[in-house]
Amino acid sequence: MSAGGSGGAAQGAIHRAIDAVWRMESARIIATVARMVRDVGLAEELAQDALVAALEQWPEAGVPDNPAAWLTAVAKRRALDRLRHLQLAEHKAGEIGREIDAQHDIAQADFADAVDAALDDDIGDDLLRLVFTACHPVLSTEARVALTLRLMGGLTTDEIARAFLVPEATVAQRIVRAKRTLAEARVPFEVPRRHELEARLASVLEVLYLIFNEGYSATAGDDWMRPALCDEAMRLGRIVAELVPREARCTALSR
């Protein structure tokens, strides 16, 4: 094989490795960053920045020993840079900057708390927060399904569109609107309090059921089953089962 062919194969292997790591770790990375910036849309953007950095650097430098930690560290640095920038903007703007918009609220956050959050590795709680945020009842059912597959499943808009046999533009619009709705409603990035947990968990379980059901008995297309969607629903279900208290799951399932 020529040197060029060998190099192309090596780069292809690295790109496949990046794709595999992103599929497995993107939800954790987004969840970690979302705890810092309190905005899932911004968190996904910063996590994607880390992915782009990997695509640029790993083909030359090689895949790191701990690729997930590398991506998380880059995403955290981008988040801290953003927080510093917004904090500086707030300082310059003074009092009039305090009521500008929801995006600027990120700058209001105490910066020391953000740094502490960046160093905290409470991944389980972060994932649970991300699940409940993506499945928030303020969103339509279709938006919840699309956003969950995007943030928790790491699927592209094209993959989600092909899974549900709808135009890619439709899925992209749902995701954009979902992020905007969450920001405008100022939905907190947190696990619901005990008195809200059961009702909110029912929304999460509904999304997982719809994803699994679409995979098990497709509503459109030539294929009767789409195993990938079933697998994704079960994977997300396991995350919820591990993280949510058993009594809350039982109550939500009995509704």
Image (tube, rainbow, N blue to C red):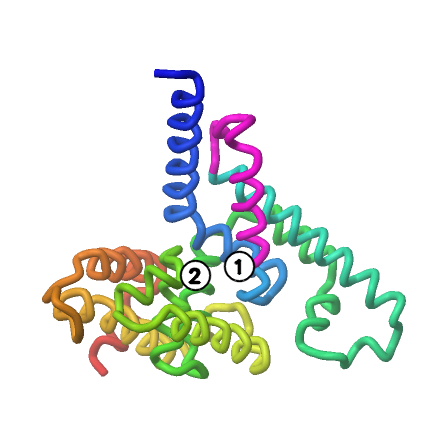
Q: How many marks?
A: 2
Is 245 situated above or below 202?
above
Question: Is residue 15 on the magenta stretch?
Answer: no
What's under tag 2, amino acid-wise? Leu
Disc assigned to residue 151: 2
In the image shown, does 212 or 17 lie closer to the viewer? 17
Q: Horizontal and vertical percent for residue 203?
A: 34, 77
Decide which of tag 1 and tag 2 comes sooner along the chain.
Answer: 1
In the image shown, does 176 or 210 lie closer to the viewer? 176
How far, Cα to Cα, is label 1 from label 2?
7 Å
Which span is picked out in magenta?
A: 44-67
Question: Is residue 46 on the magenta stretch?
Answer: yes
Residue that label 1 marks: 44
On screen, residue 198 versus residue 14, left or right, reads left
Quadrant in which residue 212 is drawn? bottom left
Crowd rating for badge 1 (residues with CA inside 10 Å; few <14, some 14–19, many 20+): many
Residue under the point 61% across and 46% down: 119
Q: Are marks 1 and 2 in contact (CB under 8 Å)?
A: yes
- Label 2: element kind: helix
Crowd rating for badge 2 (residues with CA inside 10 Å; few <14, some 14–19, many 20+): many
Residue under the point 82% across and 68% down: 90
On screen, residue 89 versus residue 199, left or right, reads right
On screen, residue 49 versus residue 208, left or right, reads right
Which quadrant of the rendered structure holds the N terminus? top left
- Magenta stretch, overall SS: helix
In the image shown, does 140 or 176 lie closer to the viewer? 176
What's under tag 1, amino acid-wise? Glu
